[in-house]
Amino acid sequence: MYAVIEAGGKQHKVELGQVLEVDLLHEKSGADYAFENVMLYVDGNDVQIGQPYIENAKVVAEIVEEVKGDKVTILRFRRRKHSIRKIGHRQKYTQIKIKEIKVGK
């Protein structure tokens, strides 16, 4: 059984017990968060496709912690001008664990 949800403008394929990183959610660790935008649900031969979302469906996840991604370095260089600018960035993510997938009729 798995589902495809939309979180932060991106689509994620999720299964029960899976731990994944989504864009930053401003919630505390240990809290539950429900994703209402379920686009696809598959359970064996039972397949439901939303247009664009499935009605009365949600994925409940537990927020594990807030983490930072890998560092991205941006280097701006202007040749023959003696001008270099170096900038770094680390994106923040929320780590979640999928607890249940509910699809009501």
Image (cartoon, rainbow, N blue to C red):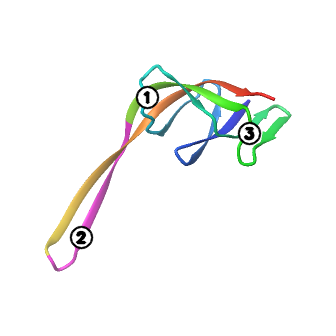
Residue drawn at point x = 26 percent, y = 67 percent: 76
- The residue pinned by badge 3 equals 54
Query: Which numbered disc, 2 or 3, marks the residue closer to the eye?
Result: 3
Q: Residue 86 appears at what percent x and percent y?
A: 22, 59
Residue 4 part of the magenta segment:
no
Characterize the local packing of mark 1: few (<14), some (14-19) or many (20 or more) Cα atoms within 10 angstroms. few
- The residue pinned by badge 2 equals 77
- The residue pinned by badge 1 equals 27
Residue 11 or residue 83, whichever sits in front: 11
Give the SS element for disc 3. Answer: loop
Magenta stretch prevailing secondary structure: strand
Give the SS element for disc 1. Answer: loop
Q: Separation of disc 3 and disc 1 at Cα?
A: 25 Å
Query: Which numbered disc, 1 or 2, marks the residue closer to the eye?
Result: 1
Residue drawn at point x = 13 percent, y = 74 percent: 82
Residue interval drawn in magenta? 68-81
Q: Residue 27 appears at what percent x and percent y?
A: 43, 28
Q: Separation of disc 2 and disc 3 at Cα?
A: 48 Å
Identified by mark 3, the residue type is Ile
Q: Separation of disc 1 and disc 2 at Cα?
A: 39 Å
Q: Residue 24 appears at what percent x and percent y?
A: 43, 38
Residue drawn at point x = 42 percent, y = 33 percent: 26
Q: Residue 54 appears at what percent x and percent y?
A: 74, 39
Identified by mark 1, the residue type is Glu
